[in-house]
Amino acid sequence: MSSSKLDELCVNTIRFLAVDTVLPRNIKARISIEAGSPLGWERYVGDNGVIIGIPHFGASAPGKVIYEKLGLTAQHVVDEAANLRQGGEK
């Protein structure tokens, strides 16, 4: 195995182990909150998780106004967490 392939394997192994440490596999109820594109969070929240984000662009307004309009509020996060905890549908 070449040095660069070995380096890549090591880096990927470290990333994998780090994610497993922070997000243990036995924890299925996961939520990601991203004030931007939700792209890529699927691999972290898993099939049972919830992704809260902005799947489009082009909206503009003061922060509080736009976050409320797009559902990026504390209440929305609380509601999603409660639903997830009760085993509800996404």
Image (spheres, grey):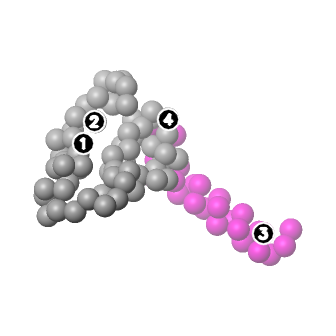
Q: CA distance from mark 3 to mark 1?
A: 41 Å
Q: Which residues are magenta?
A: 1-27
Name above or below for residue 34 compared with residue 84: below
Of all residues, the one furthest to the bottom in this rendering is 3
Mark seen at residue 5: 3
Tag 2 secondary structure: helix
Prevailing secondary structure class for the magenta stretch in the rendered image:
helix
Which one is in front in this view, the residue at disc 3 or the one at disc 4? 4
- C-beta proximity under 8 Å, tags 2 and 4: no
> At label 1, which amino acid type do we have?
Val
Name above or below for residue 30 compared with residue 55: above
Q: Nearer the viewer, residue 37 or 47?
A: 37
Residue 78: percent from left, percent from top:
21, 39
Residue at 45% x, 43% y is 45
> At label 3, which amino acid type do we have?
Lys
> At label 2, which amino acid type do we have?
Glu
- Relative side of 73 to 86, left or right: left
Q: Quadrant of residue 64?
A: bottom left
Which residue carries the number 4 mark? 47
> At label 4, which amino acid type do we have?
Asp
Residue 80: percent from left, percent from top:
28, 36
Name above or below for residue 8 compared with residue 32: below
Tag 4 secondary structure: loop
